[in-house]
Amino acid sequence: MSDVSFMFTITDRDRVEQFSKLYREHGVEIGFVSYGHGTAASEILDTFGLEDAEKALLMSVILQDSFPAIRKDLEQRYHIDVPGTGVVFTVPMSSIGGKRQLSILLGRQRYIPKEESEMKNTENELIIVIANRGYTEGIMDAARSAGVRGGTVLHAKGTAMQGKEKFLGFVLAEEKEMIIMVVKTASREGVMRAIMDQSEVKAAQAVCFSLPVSATAGMRLADPTEE
C-alpha cells in the first residue's frame, strides 16, 4: 500500500484556500484541516524566516505517483521552497480498512493496484479513524476489545468552501473526530477489523487506515501475545 500516502501540509491559516485550489487541480481534496500555533522559539523562527502566525494543518490522501507534479506546482506557483511559505510531506499508508474505504479516501483519483509492498522493520503502526462526532466511545470500545489501551481524539472540520460538497462519503461542513492510536504492527489487522465490525461504524460514516511508525518513546504498547 506504499503507493498511497497521507499528505500533510502546514502553512499559515490565510493560505488554506490557495493550497486547496492547487490540490483540487490535481484531483486531490483536502480531507480535514486543524488549526494551531507553531511552537518554535523566536530565534529559530528568525533563522528560518518564519513568522509566529496561526497555522493550519491540512490532511489529504494522495497517490504517491502524483506528488512530483504537485511538488513542482508548489515550487513554481507558491514558492514552497522559500522559508516561511509552508511545509508539505507525505507518509506512506500501510493498510486501509477495505476497498470501499480506499475508494472514498481517494475520491476522484484513479488507483491502479500494484504489487503490495510494506515498510520493513516497523514494530508499531499509527491507526487513524475519522468519524462523525459523537461515536468515539463506541469506536474506542471496539479498539479496546482488541487490546488497545487508549488513544487520542482530535476535533476537525471538512474544508468544502461552498454548497454540500462531499469527501470521505459525508458532507464536509459536519464536524468530525479523528481518533489516533499506536499499536503493535502484529495486532494492527485485528484492531482495524474490530473497529470496522463495530455496529456504529456505518452510522458514524467512519474510515479507518494505518501509517507506519518508525520510532516511539515513552510508551509501552500492549502485545496480544502477552498474558
Image: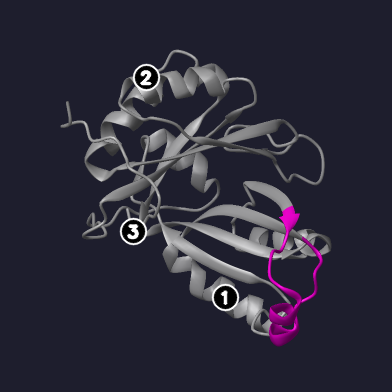
- Disc 3 marks which amino acid? Ser
Find the magenta span and give its range.
Answer: 36-54
Distance (Cα) linking label 1 and label 2: 38 Å
Name the element at disc 1: helix
Res. 83 image quadrant: bottom right
Seen from the viewer's position, the closer of residues 121 and 162 is 121
Mark 2 falls on what kind of element? loop
Residue 72, given in percent of the width and then of the height, sits at: 58, 80
The mark found on residue 197 in the picture is 2
Q: Quadrant of the image for the C terminus? A: top left
How many numbered marks appear? 3
Query: What numbered label is drawn on residue 2?
Result: 3
Between 42 and 117, the residue placed more toward the observer is 42
Give the mark nearer the N terminus: 3 vs 2. Answer: 3
- Does residue 31 appear anywhere in the picture? yes
Chain-order first, disc 1 or disc 2:
1
Q: Residue at x 36, y 60 (%)?
A: 3
C-alpha span from label 3 to label 1: 18 Å
Q: Position of residue 175 (x, y in %)?
A: 71, 32
